[in-house]
């Protein structure tokens, strides 16, 4: 959370998404806050069912939130109408799913798959752009092959090319490496990072893969439909010229001041039900409830 | 594989790729569309062709006498002074045919010119023949055969067209060979005239009349020598002309008390008509027959009502013919034709056939559309991912719909247009514009299905749920509406009862469809409930297959189309077999009512006295009775007069002959005795038991007292719908009034009877008739036979559709089944058990559909058949009651089930071998 004041590229505030299926309500997102700056690369992690995909679906315009606010590149995702939504999906966002089958149509060649979003957007100069994108992602050789004739990694790289076809400002990727082995997954992630760095595209990537999250400057953790903590990695070159890796963990405070403590903190001090709080000059201290647990000090 | 025709990364290229990728599914849609549209296009055209053929056949088979437009006027062409003077002055320039006939012929042609177009098209060139009173022409020696030979002299201006002389020459103008002096009043009293005539070879031979031989006729003013100058044969003996001049080719022979009397026609020279009329004693009647031959060989079924109207209008108007009787102009008079009755009959037959086939076809038609929708689902399944992917990439609903609409046009509209055009080529019949549009419109089904698969982009879950709720509400409402409408239609139909208008009654056609759809809804609603109850009652120990199968069938949505197809198909199979039985038995009882006995012989000239005896002497004839039809006469009773047909027979013999004839009334034993001088009679349609009245009968219109001793509804083979009286011959003859010769002999037979020999023995005219042949002849003529074929075709078609719908449903259900099976396989299910699960998928619902379909098919005939006039198909006078032949019903149902099972089995085998599910790639998205 480095930027304040100026508008972030992706901005979610108190985002709520409630699914009602057969009378049962599932709160997939319950007041999620997220800000991502332009050209940033953010990884989203979280347990299964914590609402990661729900968030990405909302950001990609496939789903609409139940409440809260969500803005991407100036588009208000809640009030967006059909026409704007189509324009948004054509030109503002591109996305990559975990299942390659959802990204590519099986009966089209790699090149045709990449051309498809441009056909939809009625963009000219398709052939050149297809060649360029396949080249950038290093899969030019697969051009005339169909998805079934490609490896998983190639498929996902082509999927990234598809997502980039109409020069979007934002790439959303939901576990793009989920089905791949470590090596390939590294390659695909490299491609994503390459796109981020070279083309300056904002990237939000959902992942379970610690390898990935560790290579990302900013990792946001979602718990029970809320952003709970953030890890920011910085590498600085110190006065000796050696590279210093700094890993800082932040908790996210919402607008009304609620805070979610990281799991391991809670476990370490066996925090339960009630905690003692004290406002110090430049920080807030938290202790276990002493009246219940005698003998322990803060 | 690269197609350079299209732009490398263009939309068209992508569409083609997509179409090629799902060609299997596309092909199924194309074939189904071809089949269904073909059926929609062929049906009305084939029907129209059959109706047209039926109309033409009916007209062609009727006798020309009945068919043609005929006017009979008492008079002949104008007899001018010239005609009479010609008798006295052989020096005068000869009269020409045109002089005599020209004006009359002109007036006939004018009448034809004024005909409306259709009538003018079917009428041929007019003919007119003038006939003089018959003259008795005895031969010199007594004739071996005839006690009397009468010759009717005919004059036909165009007779040269119809005859060809085989001997001698055409007759010329009469010649006066001797002439008495005029008396004091200036009028000639006695002439000696030779009138040349031509006879047919047949008549000349039977009359033993040689060329050059003259037979003399004495008239008040002349001694007329009829000299045979020419013997001819008919150019075409089958020409209707020879029916209009009936006894010109062969003499007509009648048996009278003194012996055989012959009547024949001979031609005189046409221009001599006025002259000969005068010679034969002018003032005698002269009759001219004018007719337009009607040739219906170009008539189309759809022109029948118009032709009837035109004929009616033409006949209603009086047409001046410029004829003269006794030098006085004959007033304009009217034409008449039996064609109106024939065509009315054709129309009634057509109306009934249209109503019946509509009832039978409306089911398969609806099923055809449903199957096409089902086939379209195959393609929709393959487009789901494309739709999802493209709309996620920002394709608007409009774009997607356009893409799918193009595909719908290619897979749906193009085949239906092709099928319609091909059908119209194959059976080129004029049909209404609707029958072009309807089959083509079948192609809208795939388009609608494809386009309907696109939901507006970004449909939220909330809106989606609302839409689902709305759909549920719509479905429940339509369910209630359809069932309600069906109930109302049934009630209306029952209330209204028989009402046979001329047009097809929409209520009549819609009711079976409504009831059928309502039955399907009930099946679809009841079925899951029933299975849920079954599943609940089953112990888990009942076996995996039973348990999983019943639970699954109860929970998953039932495939509506196979249910509809099965219910419709079975209902139609049962309905048509009931209908056929009804028609067949109706025709049978109509035949018995017509024929009246095992064998019936008739003779127009009357049977000889020993006819019954010689019949009884014939092998196989057990009983025989001769019946005299004394014709229709007046029955006076009190102050009322009724027309009755009087039938006379040996009543005890009649009772014995008709002992086993359906519908024959039991006859009292004592009809042969007079009761106080009064003839006892059995009466139908008139009088009451005990009444005494008098009927007019005999040569001098004597009054015969009769009393009704019993009433009956009809006498098979004898009564014909109008009131009748049956009396015993001996009782009747005891009153002293003689009867004509019997013209009917009814026989009871056992075993084989040589009918041809029997006919020869009895000297009948025409072959003998017996009910089975009567039925057969009737069933093979007209629409009755076509109807049977049409029914079989529609049952077969319904079977195919049912099989197709089941196969498609199984294919569409393959992915879900596959998932289930793969789960169960890990639990150790065997292949046999897996098959059992497939059986559970369709089995119970098929069973329920069977029950409902058969029930429906059995219930509908009673409901709707009273509204369709079946008499055109039975030939009876009464609407037949609904008849069931349980064997036939069972056979039809069995055949239907076997057909469906075989087709589904073959399809399953083929699909197993080809891995059809994969070829069609159903649900490859797992959607
Ligand atoms: N369409 C839906 N209808 C009902 N509930 C849903 C729907 N989609 C998601 N959910 C529920 O919302 C919650 C969040 O789901 P989501 O898919 O966002 O989780 P996730 O973080 O992506 O999990 P995973 O890592 O397993 O993919 C889950 O409890 C899920 O059951
Ligand atoms: Mg997920």
Image (cartoon, coloured by chain):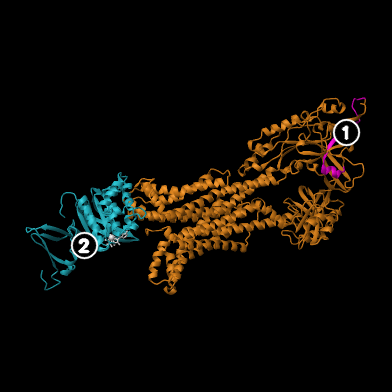
Chain colours: A cyan, B orange
**Which chain does tag 2 point to?**
A
**Which chain does tag 1 point to?**
B
Whether B60 is drawn above or below B796: the answer is: above
Dots 1 and 2 on the same chain: no
Quadrant in which the C terminus of chain B appears: bottom left
Can you tell which quarter of the image residue B124 is in?
top right
Q: Residue B187 colored magenta?
A: yes
Which contiguous range is marked in magenta?
A: B184-208
- Circles 1 and 2, Cβ within 8 Å, touching? The answer is no
Can you tell which quarter of the image residue A288 is in?
bottom left
Q: Which residue is mark 2?
A: A211
Q: Nearer the viewer, residue B163 or A35?
A: B163
Q: Which residue is mark 1?
A: B194
Ligand 1, what quadrant? Answer: bottom left
Left or right relative to A291: residue B867 = right
- Image coords of residue B882 (percent x, y): 63, 58
- Secondary structure beneath label 1: strand
Category of crowding for the residue at label 2, using alpha-carbon neighbours closer than 10 angstroms: few (below 14), some (14–19), many (at least 20): few
Category of crowding for the residue at label 1, using alpha-carbon neighbours closer than 10 angstroms: few (below 14), some (14–19), many (at least 20): many
Q: Nearer the viewer, mark 1 or mark 2?
A: 2
Q: Residue B4 colored magenta?
A: no
- Image coords of residue A169 (percent x, y): 24, 49
Left or right relative to B333: residue B117 = left
- Image coords of residue A37 (percent x, y): 19, 52
């Amino acid at each position: 959370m480095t930027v304040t004041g100026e508008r972030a590229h992706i901005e979610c505030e108190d985002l709520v998404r409630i699914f009602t299926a057969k009378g049962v309500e599932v709160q997939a997102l319950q007041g999620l806050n997220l800000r991502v700056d332009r050209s940033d690369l953010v990884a989203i992690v979280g347990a299964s069912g914590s609402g990661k995909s729900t968030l990405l679906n909302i950001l990609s315009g496939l789903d609409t939130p139940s409440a809260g606010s969500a803005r991407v590149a100036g588009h208000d995702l809640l009030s967006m109408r059909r026409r704007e939504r189509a324009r948004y999906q054509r030109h503002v966002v591109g996305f990559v799913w975990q299942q390659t089958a959802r990204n590519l149509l099986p009966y089209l060649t790699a090149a045709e798959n990449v051309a498809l979003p441009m056909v939809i957007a009625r963009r000219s100069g398709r052939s050149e752009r297809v060649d360029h994108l396949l080249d950038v992602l290093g899969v030019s050789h697969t051009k005339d092959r169909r998805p079934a004739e490609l490896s998983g990694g190639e498929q996902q790289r082509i999927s990234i090319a598809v997502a980039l076809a109409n020069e979007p400002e934002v790439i959303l990727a939901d576990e793009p490496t989920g089905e791949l082995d470590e090596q390939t997954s590294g390659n695909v992630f490299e491609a994503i990072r390459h796109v981020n760095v070279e083309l300056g595209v904002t990237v939000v990537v959902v992942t379970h893969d610690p390898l990935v999250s560790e290579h990302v400057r900013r990792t946001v953790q979602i718990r029970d439909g809320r952003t709970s903590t953030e890890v920011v990695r910085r590498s600085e070159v110190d006065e000796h010229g050696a590279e210093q890796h700094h890993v800082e963990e932040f908790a996210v405070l919402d607008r009304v001041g609620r805070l979610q403590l990281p799991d391991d903190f809670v476990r370490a001090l066996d925090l339960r039900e009630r905690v003692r709080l004290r406002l110090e000059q430049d920080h807030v201290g938290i202790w276990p409830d002493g009246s219940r647990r005698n003998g322990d000090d803060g | 594989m690269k197609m350079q025709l299209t732009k490398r990364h263009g939309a068209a290229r992508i569409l083609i790729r997509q179409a090629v990728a799902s060609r299997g599914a596309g092909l199924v849609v194309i074939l189904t569309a071809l089949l269904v549209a073909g059926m929609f296009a062929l049906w009305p055209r084939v029907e129209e062709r059959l109706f047209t053929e039926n109309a033409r056949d009916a007209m062609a088979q009727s006798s020309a006498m009945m068919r043609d437009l005929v006017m009979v006027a008492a008079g002949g062409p104008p007899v001018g002074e010239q005609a009479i003077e010609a008798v006295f002055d052989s020096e005068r320039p000869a009269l020409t045919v045109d002089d005599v006939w020209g004006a009359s012929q002109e007036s006939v042609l004018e009448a034809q010119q004024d005909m409306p177009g259709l009538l003018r098209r079917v009428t041929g060139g007019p003919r007119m023949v003038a006939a003089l009173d018959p003259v008795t022409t005895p031969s010199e020696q007594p004739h071996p055969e005839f006690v009397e030979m009468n010759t009717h002299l005919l004059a036909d201006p165009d007779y040269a067209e119809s005859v060809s002389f085989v001997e001698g020459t055409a007759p010329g103008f009469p010649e006066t060979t001797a002439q008495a002096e005029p008396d004091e009043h200036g009028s000639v009293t006695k002439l000696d005239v030779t009138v040349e005539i031509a006879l047919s070879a047949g008549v000349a031979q039977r009359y033993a009349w040689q060329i050059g031989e003259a037979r003399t006729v004495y008239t008040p003013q002349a001694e007329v020598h009829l000299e045979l100058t020419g013997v001819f044969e008919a150019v075409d003996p089958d020409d209707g002309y020879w029916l209009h001049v009936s006894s010109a080719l062969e003499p007509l022979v009648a048996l009278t008390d003194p012996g055989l009397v012959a009547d024949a026609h001979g031609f005189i020279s046409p221009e001599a008509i006025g002259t000969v009329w005068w010679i034969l004693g002018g003032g005698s009647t002269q009759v001219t027959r004018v007719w337009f031959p009607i040739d219906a060989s170009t008539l189309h079924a759809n022109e029948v009502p118009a032709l009837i109207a035109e004929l009616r209008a033409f006949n209603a108007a009086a047409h001046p013919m410029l004829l003269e009787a006794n030098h006085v102009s004959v007033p304009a008079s009217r034409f008449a034709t039996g064609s109106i009755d024939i065509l009315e009959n054709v129309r009634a037959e057509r109306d009934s056939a249209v109503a019946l086939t509509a009832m039978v076809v409306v089911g398969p038609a609806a099923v055809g559309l449903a199957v096409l929708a089902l086939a379209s689902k195959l393609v929709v399944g393959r487009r789901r991912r494309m739709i999802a992917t493209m709309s996620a990439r920002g394709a608007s609903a409009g774009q997607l719909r356009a893409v799918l609409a193009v595909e719908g046009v290619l897979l749906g509209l193009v085949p239906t247009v092709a099928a319609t055009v091909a059908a119209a080529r194959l059976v080129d019949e004029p049909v209404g514009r609707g029958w072009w549009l309807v089959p083509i419109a079948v192609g809208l089904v795939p388009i609608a299905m494809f386009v309907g698969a696109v939901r507006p982009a970004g449909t939220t879950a909330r809106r989606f749920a609302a839409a689902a709720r709305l759909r549920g509400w719509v479905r429940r409402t339509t369910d209630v509406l359809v069932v309600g409408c069906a109930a109302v239609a049934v009630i209306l139909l029952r209330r209204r009862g028989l009402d046979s208008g001329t047009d097809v009654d929409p209520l009549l056609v819609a009711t079976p469809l409504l009831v059928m759809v309502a039955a399907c809804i009930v099946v679809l609603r009841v079925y899951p409930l029933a299975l849920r109850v079954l599943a609940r009652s089953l112990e888990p120990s009942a076996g995996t297959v039973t348990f999983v199968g019943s639970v699954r069938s109860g929970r998953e949505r039932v495939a509506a189309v196979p249910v509809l197809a099965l219910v419709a198909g079975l209902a139609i199979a049962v309905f048509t077999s009931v209908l056929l039985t009804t028609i067949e038995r109706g025709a049978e009882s109509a035949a018995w009512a017509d024929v009246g006995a095992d064998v019936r012989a008739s003779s127009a000239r009357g049977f000889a006295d020993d006819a019954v005896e010689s019949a009884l002497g014939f092998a196989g004839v057990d009983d025989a009775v001769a019946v005299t039809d004394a014709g229709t006469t007046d029955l006076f009773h009190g102050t009322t007069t009724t027309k009755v047909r009087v039938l006379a027979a040996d009543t005890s013999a009649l009772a014995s002959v008709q002992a086993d004839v359906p519908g024959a009334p039991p006859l009292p034993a004592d009809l042969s005795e007079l009761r106080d001088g009064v003839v006892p009679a059995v009466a139908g349609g008139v009088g009451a038991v005990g009444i005494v009245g008098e009927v007019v009968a005999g040569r001098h219109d004597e009054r015969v007292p009769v009393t009704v001793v019993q009433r009956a509804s009809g006498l098979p083979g004898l009564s014909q719908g109008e009131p009748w009286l049956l009396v015993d011959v001996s009782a009747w003859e005891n009153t002293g009034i003689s009867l004509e010769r019997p013209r009917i002999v009814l026989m009871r037979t056992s075993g084989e009877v040589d009918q041809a020999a029997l006919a020869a023995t009895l000297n009948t005219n025409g072959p003998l008739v017996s009910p089975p042949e009567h039925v057969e002849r009737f069933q093979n003529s007209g629409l009755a036979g076509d109807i049977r074929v049409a029914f079989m075709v529609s049952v077969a078609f319904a079977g195919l559709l049912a099989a197709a719908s089941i196969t498609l449903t199984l294919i569409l259900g393959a992915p879900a089944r596959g998932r289930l099976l793969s789960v169960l396989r890990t639990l150790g299910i065997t292949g046999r058990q897996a098959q059992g699960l497939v059986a559970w998928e369709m089995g119970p619902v098929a069973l329920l559909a069977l029950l409902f379909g058969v029930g429906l098919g059995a219930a509908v005939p009673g409901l709707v058949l009273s509204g369709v006039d079946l008499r055109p198909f039975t030939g009876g006078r009464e609407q037949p009651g609904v008849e069931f032949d349980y064997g036939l019903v069972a056979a039809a149902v069995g055949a239907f089930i076997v057909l469906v099972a075989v087709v589904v089995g073959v399809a399953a085998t083929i699909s197993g071998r080809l891995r059809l599910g994969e070829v069609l790639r159903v649900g490859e998205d797992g959607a």
